[in-house]
Each structure stands twice: as C-alpha cells, then as structure tokens.
Image: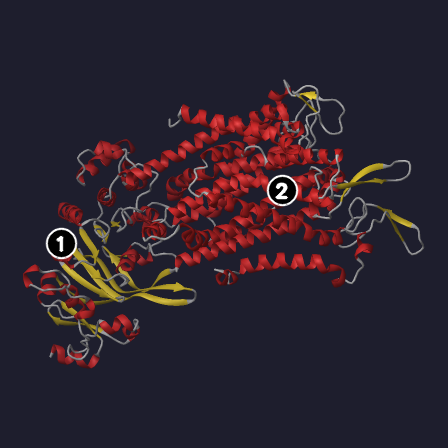
Amino acid sequence: MILKLVKQPQFVIGFLFILSLLFLSFYWPSLFNVNKAESLKLMEFMYDENGAITGSIPFSPSEVPPFGTDVTGRQLFYQILDGAKYTLIITFGVAFFRIFLSVVITLINPKANYSFLNDLVSATLTIPTTILAYIFMTSLMMKNTIEPMGLTKLIIIQGLILVGIGIPPLISTFSGEIKSILNLDYIKNTFALGAKKPYVYYRHVLPELSTRLILLFAQQMIQVLILLAHLGVLSIFIGGAQTLMLGDIFNLTPKDIPLAGEWSGIIGMSFTKLQTAPWAILIPLSCFAVTIFALNLIIQGVQHGVEETRKL
Amino acid sequence: MYFSIHSYFKRLRATILGVLILSILPPLVFGINTQLEPEVWLYTIIGLPEPYPIFPEIYEKFLYSMTIFFSALLLGLLSAMILTFTTSLLPRFIQRMITHLLTILESLPDLFIVVVLQVFVVYLYKQTGVVIYFYNDYENPIYLLPILVLSFVPAIQLFKITFLLMREEQHKSYVTVARALGLGRFYIMMRHVFRNVLSSLCQYSKTIVVFMLSNLFIVEYVYNLNGLMYLLMNTKGGAAFLVTAMFIAIPFSVLFELADNFKMASNNDNKESAA
Amino acid sequence: MNQHILEIEKLKVSFKKKSEQHIAVNEVSLQVERGQTVALIGESGSGKSITSLSVLNLLPVNGFVESGSIRFDGKELLTYSDKEMRKIRGNEISMIFQDAIASLNPGMKVGIQITEGLRYHNLIPKPDLKSEALQLLEQVGFNNPAHVYHQYPEQLSGGMKQRILIAMAMSCKPKLIIADEPTTSLDVTIQRQVLDLIDQYKTDLSASVLLITHDFGVVAEYADWVYVMLGGHIVESADVYTIFKNPMHPYTKALIGSIPNPSSGQERLKSIQDYPLESVSNDGRRFAPDTYTKESSFFDTPSSLIEVEPLHYVRFYDEERKVTAIG
C-alpha cells in the first residue's frame, strides 16, 4: 500500500509540502540566520537612518517585506513560519486522537447497534461544530478566569474539547463501515472456517479499513484546520491569551495576544482591524488554504492509488 | 408519499434529546454556569451591556437566516448546474484543467472567501464609489452579499460532484444505446444523463446542507448579521441555546427525514429487482 | 439495386493507448445480403464487436478507423458527418447490445425509452407515441403491455430487458439490425425466445441481420452465411452448410468441435487447447495453441483469403503452401 502511494505524484507533493513546512517551522532561525527573539519582537515604529519615524504599525507587505506586520507590529513572515509547527501539531494530534479513540470505541463492541447514537448525531449535525466548540471553550475560559490553571492543563483540556466534538459522528461512520466489512463474503468465510474474532479483526478488518483511515485522517485534519480558523475569528485561542496594553499613553486599549503563536491566533488578533490591515488576515488564511490544498492532494493521491489497485 | 409519522417522531425525539444534551453538557463538564443572566430567555452580546430577550425577535431572525440560506442553496444549485452543463460541452483537455482548478477552489476555507469579498467590496468603494452594504443595519437587513458568499461553497461542491457523476454516467452503456438509436448528444445529455445525475445528487444533500449551515454561521458573524446563528452563539448554552438550537434542528431534521425516505425508497426498488 | 445491404471492405480499426497503437480489426471484408442473417463468430477480443461498432461510427474515443470502406445501401458511411450518421442510426441500422442490464436508463420508464428514437426522429406524431410503444411491447411478447409501459428497468428481469432493447431497436423499422451477442447475458431458456424475435422481425420486414456471437449452436440455427474471426482477421467464410460440413481452418474446426454432441459418446468435451498445432499438416493454415501463447505477432505475417471451393474462403498465412492446398 505504502509503496503504491509513493508512486502517486499528488500524494508525494502534498506529503512533502507538509513535511517541509514542519521542518522550516522548527529550524527557521538557523536556516535564515536570524535571531528568533529579535525577529518576533514587537516593533511599533519604523525609523529611517536618521532615527526619524517613518511609519507606524501595522506595516504593509511593501513596507516590511515579504508579508508585512500584524497590528502589534510583529513580522508576519516569521510569525507564520514559527506558528506552523503549533498549528500542524495541534491539527495532527486532534485528528489522530479523534480517529484513534473512535476506532477503539467502535472495536470494543463492533456489533453494537449505535442506532441511538446515530439518531443523536444526525439530529445535532445541524448545529455548527464551531458554535459547539465556542460554547465549550467559553465555559472553559470562564472557569480559567475564576480559578486559573496551568498552561499545559489548559491546552490539554482545549485539545480534549476539540477531540471530543469530532468523536460521535466518527463512531457512527466507523460502526457502519466495520459492519459492512464484516458482511463481506471473505470475512464470513474466515469465520465459517473457524477463525477467532481478534484474529479476524487484526488480519482482515483493520487492513480493509486502513485506506479509509488514511482518507478520513486527512479529511479530519482539514476539518480541524477550518475549525481552528473559525475559533481564531471568535477570539478563542489555543493556549489562552495574554492581555497587553497597546496604543499611546492617552489612548491605551487592552489587546488580547495569543500565547502560542499558531495561525488562528494571528487571524483572531487582527480580525477587528480587517480594513486597516487586510494582509494580516488574508495571509494566514491563505496559509490555511495552502495546507488544506496539500491535504486535498494527499486525499486525491490515496484515492487514485485505491482505484489503480482495483483495476489490477 | 413515503413519509411515515412514526419514524419522524423517532427523529424528533432524538433531535430534542440531542440538543438538550448539548445545552446542559458544558456546565456539567466544567461545573460552572455560563448563563449568568437572571432570566433564562436573556442573552448578551459581547461589548454590549444589556441583555436581550430571545423572544419575540427570534421569529424574525429565523425568517431572515432561512431566507439567506435557501436563496443561497438555490443560487448555488443553479450556478452549479449551469457550470456543469457548459463544461460538459467543452473539449476534454479544458475539462481536465477545470477539475484541477476545482481542487484548488475547494481548498479555500469559507472564511477566506468571506474575508476576501469584504475586502474587495471596500476596495471597490474606495476605487469607484460604488456602495455595496455588507454591515447590517438593524432596520434594513442586507441580503445580496451574504447570499452571494454563502452560495459560493455549495456551488463549487455541487459542481464538482455533478461534474464527476456526469463523467461517470456518460460512460454507461445506456448512453451508447441511445447514441445507436441516433439520438443527438445534447438530447441524450438533457433527457438521460442530467436527470440521473440530479437524482443521485440527493445522496450528497445532507453533507452539503450541514457544511452550508456552518458557513452560514461564519457569514453571520463576520458580516454582523442579525441572524439565528449569531444568536445561537451568543446564548452560550442554557435554555436560550436550547430554544434557538431547536429552531434550527427541527426544520432541518424534517428535511433530512424526507431525504432519507427518498433514498430508502429508491434503494428498495433496487432490492426488489435484485431479488 | 445492390444485392448487398452492407459491404465492409478492408476495414482497419486501431486503438491508441498512451502513444501505443494497437490494431483491433485488420483488413476485414464482409458482406450482408438483403434479407439474410449473417453471423460473425469469434472469441472475445477477436474484433467482432469493434467491427460492428465502427459500422455505426460509435467507436470508443481512443479508437479510430484507419482505412477501408463501409457501404450501406451503396452509401459510403465513413465519409458521413455526425449529423448525417444520426439519421442512419436507429432509422436504417439499429443495434442490440449484449449487456441488457446496463443498456437501459435506470431512471426512465421503459415505455418512454422504447419510443425515444421515434420521438427524436419525428417519425410519428407525438400523441401516437404511447400506442406505438404498447404495440411494440406486445410485438416482443409482453402479455400486459400497459403494465410494463409504466415500469422502470430495475423492475424487469434480464430477459424482459433484452426484449425491451429489441423493441427499441425495431421501433424505427431499420433495414439492418446488428445484434451484438444478444443472448450472452441471458439464461439458456430465454436465449431462444430472443433469437426467435429477431428472426421474426427479419422475415416480417425482409430486413437483414448481422448476428455477432461466439456460439456455433446459434449460428447453425439462424444464420445463412458465416464469417469466422480470429485476432482481428477473418479466417474463414462460407455459407452455413459448407462451414459445418467441411470446415477448413483449424480454428473453425475447434469451434465446431466444442459443440456438445451426445450421440458421439465423447467422455469429455474438447477444448481449444486440445487441437494440435497444425501448421505443417494443414498446409499453412496456422492456428491455435501457439497463437494463444505467442501473442499475435505472427498475424502480422502476410496472409490472404483463398477461395478453396466455390464461395468458401479460408485464410492462409503461408504463401508457398496454399498452392498445394488448392492443388
């Protein structure tokens, strides 16, 4: 299977893109030979050689190439590079645990009829997941302000919310999928020949599921990415936010700055300033789009691979 | 005609239960009540001091959101059909290019489209002075822009699905039979292929509707529209959430039930013939 | 008036697959006389279906006619445009396909599908379409046409669907029907019914039939003239009596030998591989076991159809030996 996937150009391109993004994100300070703290610090004004102020935040991409700065004056380019690893790891982790947990839950009792769960899932599908996540997250934030918890704990609980929201629909997908696999003729045959249940699940059901799993995994990653972008707009940041006082002395305004530098935080932070600094939102959003595109390429590659094996 | 009261009541029960669970789950999990209002029907919007009651404005909001939703769905469907139709008459290599383009367009998050359009409208105003309202006025709600934005994603998805289905359908042997009868390409497309594609499109209706509802929320939030989804978000759980969620979940569960029945009916036909 | 309704001459059809060219039909010539049933027999992949599809210009996208001519009623079909071809299709030549199950639109009532050709070609006024459809249904042996008219293809059995297809093919009263393995997907009990229907139509309207099959039993019963095809070539052609009495080409012999014959008392039916390589003993009429293993490379060697007795043609691959064979 894996050998076949390597032959699919779309799969390879998508996969390599995500890998290299991850690599860049970890090693960019040494690759570009810049100081990490220096390049991520706030800069409020721009000075020419004589020390005169030539502009103030936010700077557009033409003033500070290549991507400009966000509303707090941090260079967007480095921020995005640095944030990629958080975004990708969160997405990967959430998608992985969603799939893993739902497969485990389904396999505990594969013949269970989850019909009640199915009903509940299809009834609540109409409520957007973003709203569900938002409601859970605000409750969490409120609790956090009443009795503060550590950063790690906060991130873990937030991750659990993101994972938990996706699990019920996935269970109903998997239970249907596994049931249809168990109904295949060759599986029935194996049982008829006297195979033990765990053996059949391990040898036949899981391999049969594996391509579906890869596809679902990529799809889940896309869904999580979109959910993250939405939550960013709603000013829900993974890892919480730190309130800074910005502006001049006479006009101090509180500003929530996300602690972890992931992409949705960049979007959420600048969202109210959409008209003054559209690039600060459009550029991270395009990064989301490109990553989703890479994932779509992976999905296409897998599908092509499956089709080719069917033809043989 | 396949509508059964019993199965609908079952679904209704599940809907109410599901929404109920969602509305009590957050306080249950975190042990705090986010509903800080003294009255259950009140909700607050961040940045505004006063709480609002959800009744009676909810009816108006419901109508407004549904108008936008269904006009967008219709517009999306219509443009997808027109696009499929024109592309299927184009030469092959252009068709292949279009499928690649679709993968790119499909990857754009809904948020991206919403934001780009908003920036574009402002840019247009600055350049030409043409005004297209995108922020909601409380007295005269806007329709044009949200409908346009909301129809974009389903148009692309539907276009992709119908396009792929159409290509699959054109290789089926009944098309060759029709050609052997001397029927024209356009005639076969209209009377045979298109009709079959439309009916198999019903299978995908649920996914697209669910996706669009999520988009509707983002559109309402970003454009600050006074709709049902925005209200739902601001209720933050509790009784107000329960009622608002019902306003969304119940009508759509009727639609889903109808779609499922339709699917089941056509599946039964197939089984009969196989027997 | 021309004696032959369909004349195919030196037809060569190729398929393009990733810049590789593959010849499917190689210099095939055949004639269909008016009022006759001509059988084209051969194994799957021998090019018989492609020959029939190229008559109606319905070849798949990657296939094309390289050379040759197809004359129908004296008109050269290969020079016709798509628009002109549409008037021929269904109207003058119609086709019955082998896969009845997939050949009907699942989303349309069969009654309406039957008269599609009539409606499109404007042959009869629209209000009469329904009565015409009912009549056609009755003609193909449905006892309750009014009921069948409103059914969808899924609700019919395989044999019923094949009869619907025949009704469709007959609807415009064509002069030539090409039946592409019309009985392959049916059970044995219905095969006869279907073939009788086609035969009945032929005699009623004095039309002609080009019957494509791989079943010599069918050929014996219905055909007047037989063409045997192998690897894109016609290897033997004669009228049906001669073929059965005196088959010359080893492939024909093998095919005829594979018809079960209870009176001969054979223990086991002979399969193609049981026939020995006859390249030497049969004077260059090479065939069989080696062609099954050595691809079709030897088909490229020059060969020609020789009239071994009046109106009995056999293909020889070896120029030197044919003289002695006729000898």
Position of residue A229 measured from the top left corner of the image (x, y, whole percent): 66, 43
Q: Is residue A302 left or right of residue A236?
A: left
Q: Residue at x 69, y 37 (%)?
A: A234
Amino acid on which the number 1 mark rests in the picture: Tyr
Q: Residue furthest right?
A: A50
The residue that disc 2 covers is: A160
Is label 1 in a helix, a strand or a loop?
Answer: helix
Q: Quadrant of the C terminus of chain A?
A: bottom left
**Could you tell me which chain the residue with mark 1 belongs to?**
C
Q: On screen, B71 above or below A58?
A: above
Q: Residue at x 13, y 78 (%)?
A: C325
Q: Residue furthest left?
A: C263
Q: CA distance from mark 1 to mark 2?
A: 75 Å
**Could you tell me which chain the residue with mark 2 belongs to?**
A
- Front one among A39 and C164: A39
Position of residue A267 measured from the top left corner of the image (x, y, whole percent): 71, 43
Looking at the rendered image, the disc whose residue lies closer to the viewer, 1 or 2, is: 2
Residue A68 seen in render = yes
Q: Residues within 10 Å of mark 2 (few under 14, many from 20)?
A: some
Position of residue A274 measured from the top left corner of the image (x, y, whole percent): 74, 40
Amino acid on which the number 2 mark rests in the picture: Leu
What label sits on residue C222 in the rendered view? 1
Q: Residue at x 94, y 55 (%)?
A: A50
Q: On screen, C55 above or below C102?
A: below
